[in-house]
């Protein structure tokens, strides 16, 4: 039997545990304040990457120039921010400054929803607009519909990125092959590797690598108007035009010819990168984000060249610094961006395998980095950055991965592939 | 033979359970106005509140969102049943549900059957010949995949199953079976079966442990009597083991079926629904619709349908289990 005292204890226990439960659900949203003494910063660059090294130095520099201000840095994952950004930015937990993916489906989507701060005035006042070339700037500005290329500034990139052909010089030398200067020389080299029982191209069907090969093939027959039509909706893209058809058919043909392994349907980008690092694949076509890692980890002699006989290649300004609408210390965030744009940080970025946007060319001393930046400059001069194929509509990445896998396995012919991509594109563009 | 022995066993269990419970209740009723059950109910309050806050409210909100067109931020636009109508015609959605049925085979049916046989073998054979310590070690080995985070297990399996230099293909080559090498996760005709195989490995420990616990409460006299009567292992398994641990089988089947319907982690790590959607399942489909396509209303409709199906299955399963137990009780009386 429960005595009165025990009954009171039971009630008290229930109340205490309920209170604890509610408290645990509540979070600490009230703990943050706009005190001008804290900069809450999120980014997802690996500490040993060029950007990671540069941002770490930028934090030190910021703390030096802002005595009494604490930088609360939280390292996030790319996927983590990608998947949860709209919810986080819509809450009280938004940081003051955050690195975010660029493009219509990402930064454009958030800007349209009013979750990002308009940086136009800061970009003009602090001269960031002057430092960024036209191709790099495209991903910074978004119109009222969230389409990149014009409108207000919602993000600032501090570096650029582009795709290139990484090739294993040792293997090329072993089989008497020179660095390909033309597309025919590239295919001749791949034929030679196939004859030797080596699959020439490192590939990853389960992730972006495969559809980027296809997009690059299409780009080799495309021009700026074609890219703008597809990426910026400046016109009606025709998914059965010469460029797209060439891309899909050539890609399928390359799988048949053995340039791309049929067994790479389920592999990931990491597998492709490691295969190149280990010297198993003589060629990898991918982005400058691999550069620093190859420098650090690859034991083989390797080099790079731009995709031959193509004016356009995949690339853009790097990921963006965005200031959430609900940020509590916006001025500190602007100051931090300013520091990352300084020559000191930009040079550091450039000497660590990144592609800086405002570095002093004379200060880049690493020979490989010089080559990397020279190639980027070539692309920038000819307006050759063609963005990425998954940018136009939300969820397009999964569609491209899935449909390209079908193309690789032969369960979809090039025509059916282009039909499926077109259908998803149109559905996505029509979405509110 | 078996019938006589079984009846004795069931009788003794009934005496401890139902009748004992009645006696306690009568005792409490005789104590007067104090009702301990009411006071204990207070202790259920935090749990009930948590259930309400963490399960019921989000489910109702999710259901509400499923009637809208929404990108996760901004104002949702009420569209009524439009998402559900679209779902009915969505071949990708139905394909994902077909894959779920394969997952039920891999995560519920096969592990239950294999778990039963393994549990009986460990209990009857290994335990008797090699001792309880060996049984404990083997049981722990079988249970290990349940303890491993699925992300870790998935990454390790993706190495094992890699088409080039994967351990499985290398092993096949080493033993002269190079012709059997496959692109295990990249071949659309094979990928679903490969994921199923991994899930059998993941799941098997759970039924095994539950069944072994169940076997420990079976009266050894039943087996001894059956053995004396000349029943072989298989007859003892069929006529004693299976009927005696029927409640455990019900629980395992129900639990594993629900787990199979909502499987996500393994698909995410191993294949991301590919190649070409060959291993897509409703929870992953919902996830990509939510977060990749930011079609939150449509994603909510998928997860609402999935929840309703799981709820119905759980309720039917529980009902069947209760009915079976009632029938059993009826036999005893």
Image (cartoon, coloured by chain):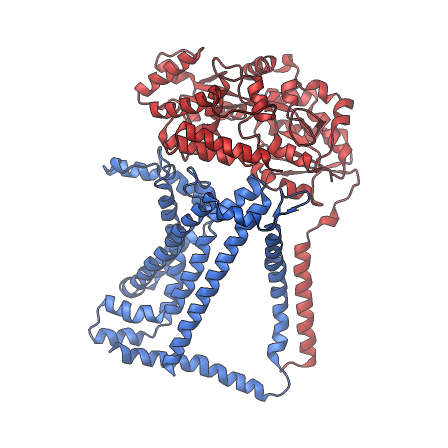
Chain colours: A red, B blue
Q: Quadrant of residue B276?
A: top left
Q: Say left or right for A288 vs A92.
A: left
In the rendered image, residue B47, in percent from the top left (x then y), is placed at 60, 65
**If the image is split into quadrants, where does the N terminus of chain B sit?**
bottom left
Against A138, residue A21 (above or below) is: below
Residue drawn at x 53%, y 45% as measured from the top left: B287
Against A116, residue B325 (above or below) is: below
Instruction: For residue A406, say whether it is visible.
Output: yes
Residue drawn at x 38%, y 22% as measured from the top left: A200
Q: Nearer the viewer, residue B56 or B202?
A: B56
In the rendered image, residue B315, in percent from the top left (x then y), is placed at 48, 65
Residue drawn at x 59%, y 47% as measured from the top left: B297
In the rendered image, residue B17, in percent from the top left (x then y), is placed at 44, 79
Q: Nearer the viewer, residue B174 or B237?
A: B237
Residue drawn at x 40%, y 11% as measured from the top left: A178
Q: Quadrant of residue B44?
A: bottom right
Q: Quadrant of residue A386?
A: top right
**If the image is split into quadrants, where does the C terminus of chain B sit?**
bottom left
């Amino acid at each position: 039997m429960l005595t009165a005292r025990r009954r009171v204890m039971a009630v008290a226990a229930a109340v205490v545990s309920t209170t604890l439960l509610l408290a645990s659900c509540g979070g600490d949203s009230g703990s943050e304040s706009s005190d001008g003494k804290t900069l809450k910063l999120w980014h997802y660059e690996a500490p040993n990457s060029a950007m990671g090294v540069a941002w770490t130095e930028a934090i030190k520099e910021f703390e030096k120039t802002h005595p009494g201000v604490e930088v609360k840095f939280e390292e996030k994952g790319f996927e983590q921010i990608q998947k949860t950004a709209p919810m986080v930015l819509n809450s009280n937990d938004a940081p003051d400054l955050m690195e975010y993916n660029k493009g219509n489906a990402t930064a454009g989507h958030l800007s349209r929803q009013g979750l990002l701060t308009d940086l136009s005035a800061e970009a003009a006042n602090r001269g960031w607009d002057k430092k960024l070339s036209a191709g790099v700037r495209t991903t910074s500005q978004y119109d009222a519909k969230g389409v990149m290329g014009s409108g207000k500034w919602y993000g600032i990139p501090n570096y650029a990125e582009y795709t290139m052909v990484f090739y294993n010089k040792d293997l090329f030398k072993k089989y008497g092959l020179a660095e390909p200067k033309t597309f025919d020389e590239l295919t001749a080299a791949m034929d030679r590797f196939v004859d030797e029982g080596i699959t020439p191209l490192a590939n990853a069907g389960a992730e972006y690598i495969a559809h980027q090969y296809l997009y690059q093939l299409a780009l080799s027959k495309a021009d700026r108007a074609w890219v703008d039509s597809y990426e910026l909706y400046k016109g009606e893209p025709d998914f059965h035009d010469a460029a797209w058809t060439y891309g899909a058919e050539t890609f399928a043909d390359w799988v048949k010819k053995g340039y791309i392994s049929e067994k790479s349907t389920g592999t990931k980008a990491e597998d492709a990168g490691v295969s190149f690092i280990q010297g198993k694949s003589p060629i990898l076509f991918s982005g400058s984000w691999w550069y620093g890692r190859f420098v650090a980890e690859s034991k083989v002699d390797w080099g790079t060249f731009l995709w031959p006989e193509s004016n356009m290649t995949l690339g853009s300004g790097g990921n963006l610094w965005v200031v959430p609408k609900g940020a509590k210390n916006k001025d500190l965030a602007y100051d931090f961006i300013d520091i990352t744009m300084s020559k000191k940080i930009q040079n550091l970025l450039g000497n660590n395998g990144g592609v800086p946007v405002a570095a002093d060319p004379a200060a880049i001393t690493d020979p490989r980095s010089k080559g990397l930046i020279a190639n980027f400059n070539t692309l920038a001069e000819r307006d050759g950055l063609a963005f990425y194929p998954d940018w136009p509509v939300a969820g397009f990445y999964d569609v491209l991965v899935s449909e390209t896998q079908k193309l690789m396995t032969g369960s979809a012919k090039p025509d059916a592939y282009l039909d499926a991509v077109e259908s998803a594109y149109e559905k996505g563009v029509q979405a509110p | 033979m078996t019938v006589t022995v079984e009846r004795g066993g069931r009788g003794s269990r009934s005496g401890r359970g139902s009748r004992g419970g009645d006696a306690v209740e009568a005792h409490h009723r005789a104590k007067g106005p104090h009702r301990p059950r009411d006071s204990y109910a207070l202790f259920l309050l935090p749990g009930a509140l948590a259930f309400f806050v963490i399960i019921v409210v989000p489910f109702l909100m999710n259901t509400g969102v499923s009637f809208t067109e929404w990108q996760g931020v901004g104002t949702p636009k009420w569209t009524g049943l439009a998402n559900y109508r679209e779902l009915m015609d969505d071949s990708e959605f139905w394909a994902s549900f077909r894959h779920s049925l394969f997952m039920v085979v891999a995560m519920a049916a096969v592990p239950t059957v294999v778990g039963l046989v393994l549990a009986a073998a460990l209990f009857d054979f290994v335990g008797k010949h090699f001792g309880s310590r060996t049984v404990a070690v083997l049981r722990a080995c079988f249970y290990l995949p349940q303890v491993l985070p699925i992300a870790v297990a998935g990454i390790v399996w993706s190495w094992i199953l890699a088409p080039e230099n994967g351990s499985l293909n290398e092993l096949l080559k080493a033993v002269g079976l190079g012709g059997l090498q496959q692109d295990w996760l990249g071949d659309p005709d094979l990928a679903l079966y490969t994921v199923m195989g991994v899930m059998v490995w993941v799941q098997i420990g759970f039924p095994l442990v539950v069944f072994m616990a169940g076997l420990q409460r079976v009266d050894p006299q039943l087996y001894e009597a059956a053995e004396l009567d000349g029943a072989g292992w298989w007859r003892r398994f069929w006529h004693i083991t299976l009927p005696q641990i029927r409640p455990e089988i019900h629980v395992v089947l129900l639990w594993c079926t629900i787990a199979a319907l909502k499987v996500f982690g393994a698909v995410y790590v191993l294949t991301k629904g590919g190649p070409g959607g060959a291993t897509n399942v409703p929870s992953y489909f919902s996830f990509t619709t939510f977060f990749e396509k930011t079609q939150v209303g449509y994603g909510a409709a998928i997860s609402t349908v999935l929840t309703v199906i799981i709820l119905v299955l759980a309720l039917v399963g529980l009902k069947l289990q209760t009915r079976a137990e009632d029938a059993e009780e009826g036999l005893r009386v």
